[in-house]
Image: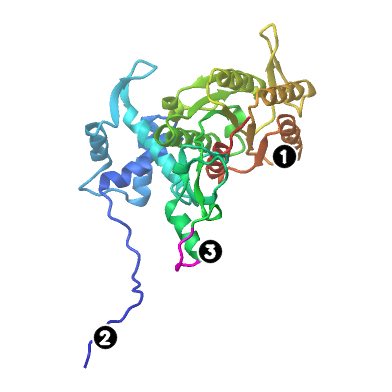
Amino acid sequence: MENVTKKGFYFKQYAAPEESPFDKLFGIFKELITHTSGDFDEAISWLRELDKEYKLTDEQYTIDDFIEDLKKKGYIKDEVKEDGSSGLGITAKTERAIRQQALEQIFGNLKRSGSGNHKTKHVGNGDEHTGDFREFHFGDGLERISLTESLRNAQINHGADEFRLMESDLVVEDTQHKSQMSTVLMIDISHSMILYGEDRITPAKKVAMALAELITTRYPKDTLDILVFGNDAWPIAIKDLPYLKVGPFHTNTVAGLQLAMDMLRRKRNTNKQIFMITDGKPSCVIERDGSYYMNSNGLDEYIVDKCYNQAQQARKLHIPITTFMIASDPYLQKFVNKFTEANQGKAFYTGLKGLGEMIFEDYETNRKKRIK
């Protein structure tokens, strides 16, 4: 009797990949250190509480063992705190690990296709092959003719018995120009970003860290500048993102936009854009004499008009503004609609869920455009 090989699917219970005790705790630690704005002691305190509740460690590997491994691997270091006491703090190696984790979390939720290499939609004599073909046109370089595809067309069109190659058989491979993008990411750090029992600043930080890691590792010719705005606006370095905190601030959107445009004026790239993450209405501007005009009651016409003026100014500089509004109040949406119309930009009304995916998708979409 002949042996018959049976083909089919074999199902078994899912088994999670094995992780070392350190790796298991390190993933949790990176999340906690982001939520605590880089406060190592607070993060470890939370980790100990989680250990008590979920039995993350055992006698063979304790939280203290984990801390020792963090030291040995260069993730933490001894430092002097602001009050003069000694303690432990995270290193640049940890900051990079946090950015990488943020990138993996957001990118893991994106449905990606192809190699992910980004180009503009302008087709012509570019420097990047697309894999797509089109008919030969007068003026196309002979070196761009796809010989294999052209011969194939000749055989289909005229038969294989008598070889004939006509101009109508010729095809060329499309190319696209690679684009460079300069982006400024504005993050609202007004007090409302932690009000109402919702932590809004941590997701904003994660998005910024992930976007920074994406650009620095995959698109090194692109630039990303990050600024925060409360009563004032100021730039922050990528390495400072894990330590970012919300302050007792109003929302000076005008100052943020002015700083963003100043940053982009100094960039040599043609393609420029501003991403703004905010959850509240503009409630503060700086007057010419340096004093602050503040009004948190409703939408102050004086303040919002200045915001509209900045949106129009950015439009004149060919800088589109994409607003990610993480609030759903109808009157705020009305403001954002008018602001977006003044700039001819875009606006997304979203909660915190999916914020990172939307920003990444919009970044890729804009990067494929040549903004004129």
Q: Would you call the spot at circle 1 few (<14 residues within 10 Å), some (14-19), or many (20 or more)?
A: few
Q: Would you call the spot at circle 3 few (<14 residues within 10 Å), some (14-19), or many (20 or more)?
A: some
Point out which mark residue 157 bears.
3
The furthest residue to the bottom: 1
Q: Nearer the viewer, residue 244 or 236?
A: 236
Residue that badge 2 annotates: 4
Q: Cα distance, mark 2 to mark 1? A: 67 Å
Q: Earlier in the sequence, mark 3 or mark 2?
A: 2
| Magenta extent | 159-164
Question: Helix or strand or loop: what does disc 1 sit on?
Answer: loop
Q: Per the image, is 190 magenta? A: no
Amino acid type, mark 3: Asn
Placement of the C terminus among the 4 image quadrants: top right
Amino acid type, mark 1: Asp
Disc 2 versus disc 1: nearer the observer: 2
Does 246 sit left or right of 68 as displayed? right
Question: Helix or strand or loop: what does disc 2 sit on?
Answer: loop
Q: Earlier in the sequence, mark 3 or mark 1?
A: 3
Placement of the N terminus among the 4 image quadrants: bottom left
The furthest residue to the top: 289
Disc 3 versus disc 2: nearer the observer: 3
**Quarter-wise, where is residue 254 in the image?**
top right
The residue that appears at 45% across and 62% down in the rendered structure is 163
